[in-house]
Structures are given as structure tokens and as C-alpha cells.
Image: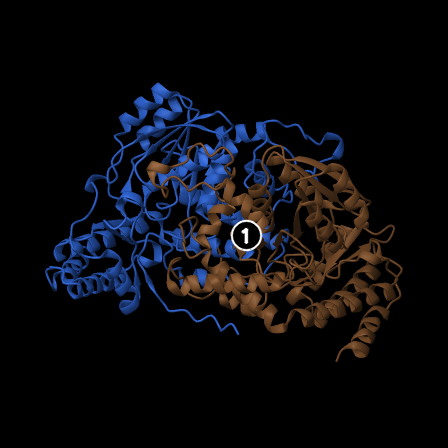
Chain colours: A blue, B brown
Amino acid sequence: MYKDLNTSVRTLMTPGPVEAEPRVLRAMCTPILGQFDPEFTEIMNETMAMIRSVFQTENQWAFPIDGTSRAGIEAVLGSIIEPGDRVLIPIYGRFGQLLTEIAERYGADVVNIETDWGQVFNPQVVIQEMQRVKPKIVAMVHGETSTGCMQPLQEIGAACRALDILFVVDAVATIGGTAVKVDEWKIDAAIGGTQKCLSVPSGMAPITFNARVEAILLERKKIERGLADPSTYQKLQTRVIRSNYFDLSQLMDYWSPARLNHHTEATSMLYALREGLRIVLEEGLTVRFARHKLHEQALVQGLKAMGLEIYGDPNCKLPVVTSIRIPAGIDGESVRHRLLQDFQIEIASSFGPLKGKIWRIGSMGYSCRKKNILHVLGALEAVLIRHGAKVYAGRAVQAALDVYDNIEV
Amino acid sequence: MYKDLNTSVRTLMTPGPVEAEPRVLRAMCTPILGQFDPEFTEIMNETMAMIRSVFQTENQWAFPIDGTSRAGIEAVLGSIIEPGDRVLIPIYGRFGQLLTEIAERYGADVVNIETDWGQVFNPQVVIQEMQRVKPKIVAMVHGETSTGCMQPLQEIGAACRALDILFVVDAVATIGGTAVKVDEWKIDAAIGGTQKCLSVPSGMAPITFNARVEAILLERKKIERGLADPSTYQKLQTRVIRSNYFDLSQLMDYWSPARLNHHTEATSMLYALREGLRIVLEEGLTVRFARHKLHEQALVQGLKAMGLEIYGDPNCKLPVVTSIRIPAGIDGESVRHRLLQDFQIEIASSFGPLKGKIWRIGSMGYSCRKKNILHVLGALEAVLIRHGAKVYAGRAVQAALDVYDNIEV
């Protein structure tokens, strides 16, 4: 009745999910181990160490949440925020709105500042607002995939530390593709995504947090019914974290030598994440980030040579996502449909005010390679011509090749 | 620095995670598709249909939560429960305590009744308590892996419906291993697990719920900031579901033709779940449940022939988990250690009052096969002899073979 799984092999050039590393897919075939098997806890410990490396942090706490990226965001925000806490969230795209949505659901008193989409904030604007609002937490998106912009974080982080404000960063789109310097930028908690620049399937969210966050978690900690000694069971821990699944204080016990039972770790996804992180560290962060910049440059030069306009302020461009204004009179969805059906390429549209206005091309992780960049440029040119758009035929791929021939070592 | 993933191949005879079906592991190697790719949304729809079949329901709503089993439980309870709601939770093991823990965190006024571990409830006792307490929800565990007992649900479900109480069932341990008749038993919402009788890795939780639950979800629904029309954005939806990630009203939009963006579906885990469900339906529920009973019988007869005592009331034994009293004077953890190190077999200990008192052997899904039953019986006998326990040497495997030779067709 139901057929064998037999999918097309797409070229995935969206801001995620992107193509998984072949080695990552193979790692998922590894037989299951029990979650307290010494071989498995060793894999857990290795994965923690590798998460620390990609976040460039010495934090003790670095582990994945068993859910997609927004699960990681909710685990961090929901474990820190207590009802009535003031949280400052500067918004420059859809995912700043998501941070706001999650924080509000956990009872935060959220203060937003907003800037035009396609821009980021001058750090001084955020710092002034911090001084005025005096929040407990500042939460920001590092790379806004909805617009293709990236917020500089270092000055804001330093100001948060000076003012004793917690700095929470959504690095879902940037981790593994461009630098996320948790310690140097004084980020107190960061959340990464797997299905973007790490090229691991969606379904886990690596996070890290420092002792400043840990102190709050320990104050809110409650041992679960069924694990606690009945005589000391704290039914009335009034500051308890609202979610059980996302309770970081419990997850600390699970990811420490105590190995206190919480969920059953997602075995195959952990194998995948470990392999994906191993590939990142084998390539080396510096080399990997330079590779992403190279392919971005080839893509951008190709798009410009075709006559297309890049959306957003180039001074804050996210290196792993390139947004393009859809030419006047062209049906953006029709172009995307033809790219998928005829060329097996997926690119993205966008959200809210940008819906129908821009396309977004991701160049992330394993999808970020010469073959894919050249294929997407050639295909997009062909489809645009097919739609009657005026483009400079033949130039896009040549411009990209110029970049590769001149720069590549 | 970090080596290739190269794990031992264990015989997993715990109550989960168990060995994954080889076809399931291979399905996870399938290349990634975009989450709104028509090929992927077809896979989503097929998986929904298969979830309905294993839950034996006509419910429209049947889809996985992207997290482990307790994520599914939290999604259901957290989406239904509003602060102050009265919830009756009868407890007969550790996972009834977990239901209580989660319900309390979402603000429920929980009323517990408890029975001795190793027993289940006389349905009339639960029904009398329902009549007295008048809860909005009764939440119960179907198969308690902590004790190895299974609660009959049909009478309780009928009474819930008659009294207009919602009946929520944790079927994590039973789905795919023994009947879970959602419609016939008048279960309003049920949660299954992947890493047990479905033999899919941990990391997803199939759930289903009916129109009675849907009505509550629609009353509490709030379109997310960033997706809502700004002019109608309902910041002050006071009954909003507290979690964003587990908000079933949003997940309904994601799993319906609207395909409203929520999380990025866990691609490879969905491939795995689809394949696991396909295998279950190919085998057929009736045949599959009979297979689990056959191997359980072989295991139980073998254990008894060895001279071991089965823990718990045999009238309510969970067919997929067998609990054994650890013989006096034997160190249960030492036996487990030797089984793992010498025989590559994992069996489980238990929690709370049963810690150090019983072992638990799972016979679930792909792990539930003749080779494994015979291997675990032979190995356990050998290890017990090695520990100086008095056992009837040589009889266990013979007793199991007697069951197979006499019953197997």
C-alpha cells in the first residue's frame, strides 16, 4: 500500500534545511545503543566537547536539545525567564518576532525596538535602549534568515556584561558558517541549528550557556516526581521552570556524570550531530568560514552580473544567505516552482512584508559548494529568461567562475 | 582527534530504546527534502495516515511531535490544560508520576490516586474517583514500563465520555506492541513512543487527538507574531497555550494543507518513522501483537524454568516488558554489567521503590525475536551461575524452545 521511500535528489539552496553531509547520513545507520551504555555516554561527552568548540566557548554546559531549533530557543528562554521579567528584544526580521513570541508565552514583559527589515541595529541604539529599559535579558538574532542580514554582537555583549544583563543569542543560522564567538562576545546563552551550516538534519538544537545562566537555573531547580526522594519532594518550588521537557536544570543532570533520567536521548540524531560537528572541526572553523565567504562572493557576483539586485544593506549582509529582489512583473513563486520541477533546485521565498518581494538563496554547509553555486546561477538565468525577464544572458556563471578562478587556491 | 563512529552491536532487551529495524536505519540515509517540497508534504500526509492506523482511529489529527516521547506527552497535556484545571491522574508507577509532574507545571490542580506498584487499578475505583473529583481530564499510563503492568482502559474511557471528561492516555510503551484502540476505548488524546515497539530511534512522538480536544485548542489558538496579520495580532489571547513549540493549535496548521510555518520538520526522523510504521502495517497489527505475545511467553517460561520469579500481578502483565525479582544476595547491577560486557546484552534496572529490586526485560518491536529471547535466557543463566545464584541450569532455553516448537506455525 505504501511504497518504498524513493525521493528526488534535490539541490537545496534555501536557508535550511540544506543537504546533509553524506557522512552524516551514513552515521545515522549506526545501530542503536542504550542511553546509559558507556559507549553512548562517551558519545554524549564527545558531542558536548565539539559543541563547545564550534561555539568558541569554555562553558561547561554545551549540549543539544532534542527538538528543532526553536526547541533550543524555547529551552533557553523558558528556563531563564520568570513571569514579569523584563526582556529587551530588538527586531530586524521574522525571527526576532519569534523570540518575542516565545518570551511572551513564558510571561516576560517584552520591550521591542524595531528597525527596517534589510537593516540591522547600530549597537549604540540597542545599548541606549538597554540603559533606559534596564531589562534582565537582551535576546537577539545573530543571522536573520528572513532578510539575509547579520547583527554585530560584540559591543552589545560587552554592554550587557557591564550592566549585568543576560545576553541570549539565536545563532541558529550562523553556527558553523560564520564566527559565533560566545566567550569573546560575552554571550551568556546561545542556540544553534543543525539543518543549516552544520548540514545535519533538522531535529536537534545545540545550545551553550555559562555560569551566570546556570546560577538562575539552580535557583529554579526541582527534582522530578518519580526521581526525587519522596520526603524532600518540592511540590511547592514556586519558581519552577514551566516546561518539564525544556527544563535546563534537569537537562544539566542528564548531561552530567549524574546521568539523571530525563528523556531518552535521540540516539540517531546524536550520531548525526556528532558526525556533523566532527566534519566542521576537521575542516577547521577559519577555513570553513572562508569557504562560505568565497561561495557567497561567487553567488553574489553571478547574480549581479545577471542584472539582479541584492536585497538589504550590504554592510550587514549575512554571508550564508543572499536575498534578491524579485524583478518587477515576475511571479516569484512560478520561478521557484520551475526551478524545483525542471532543475531540482529549491530556493526560498520569504515572510510577512517580504512575501513575494524577495527570493532567498542559502549557501550553507554541504550545500555551499562550487557545483551548487554554478548550477543555481545557470538555472535561475534560464528560468528567468523563460519567464520573459530581462537578464544579461550568459554572464552569471562567467562572473562566478571569475571569482573562483581568481581567488581559489 | 575524534574517531569514526564505531559502536558495538548490542542486543537491546530493555523497555527502550530497542534495536531499530534495519530498514528504518537505511531510510534515514535518504537525502534531505525541503519541508514544503511536494514530495515531502506527501510523506507527511502518508505518515499521518499510518499513525491513524496504528492508533486504530479515524481522528483527523494524527502526527508526530518533534521530540522524544515526553515531548509528545507535554504537547498534549500542555495544550489542553489551563491553569486551575482539575486533572485526575491514577498512579501505578514512575510514568504516572511523570504525567503528574508535567500537568502540575502547566498549572493543573492534580488529584492523584495511587495503587501498589506491580498492580493496576480496578476500573471501578478510577470511575468512582472521577465521579467524586469531577476533573476536566483523566490522564493515565497504558503500559507502565517501570513495573511491567498494563492498565485496562475501555471501562474508564466509556465512563469519561459519559461524564464529559477528557481521557488522555500515555501509550508510549504499548503502541505497535499490543492493541491501543483509541476510538473503541474512547480515548480523546493518545501519545505513542518511537523507540519501543515501533523500533524507530528515539526523537519523535506520534500523537492523535479527536474533535473534543480540537475544540479546546481552537479556543486557545493564537497565530504567531511574524505570521499573523499585524492588524489582527492577538497579543492578549489570555488563554494562549504556554509553550510555542508544543502548541498543538499551531501544529494543526503546520500538519494541514495550510502548512503554516512552525518548526522545520525533522526530515530524517520522519523518514524513519514512516518506514517504521510501514513495517508495522505490513506485518499487520493482529499478527504483530500475537508475535509479541509468543515471545513474551517463551521469555516468561524460560525465566520461570530457571527458577526466577516474575514481578507483578500476572493478570495485568504488560506483554512487552517482563519484570523479574532479583534473587536475594545477588547484585543486580553486577549482573547487568556482565551481561553487557561479556554478552553484549542490555537489560534494565528500575526506578524509585523498585531500584535494586527488579530487572526489566523488554521484548519490543525488532528486538522481540527468537534469537534475542534465546540469547538473553542463555546469557542470564550463565551470568547468574557466575554470580553464585542457584538456578536450574540448562532448563531456561529448553523451556523457551518448548514454547516455540509447540506454538509457532
Query: Where does the C terminus of chain B fall, quadrant-wise?
Result: bottom right
Label 1 Cα neighbours within 10 Å, binned few <14 / some 14-19 / many ≥20: some
Q: Is residue B322 left or right of residue B223?
A: right
The image quarter containing residue A329 is bottom left
Q: For this rendering, which residue is in front, B197 or B142?
A: B142
Query: Does residue B390 appear to the left or right of B199 in the view shown?
Result: right
Q: Residue furthest bottom?
A: B409
Q: Position of residue B297 (x, y in %)?
A: 79, 67
* Amino acid carrying mark 1 in the image: Ile
Residue A118 lies, in percent from the top left, at 24, 40
Decide which of A56, A248 is in the foreground and name it: A248
Residue at 42% over, 37% down: A101
Residue A67 x, y percent position in the rendering: 50, 48
Task: Give the residue at x 44% y 64%.
Answer: B42
Q: Which residue is mark 1?
A: A43
Q: Nearer the viewer, residue A34 or B166?
A: B166
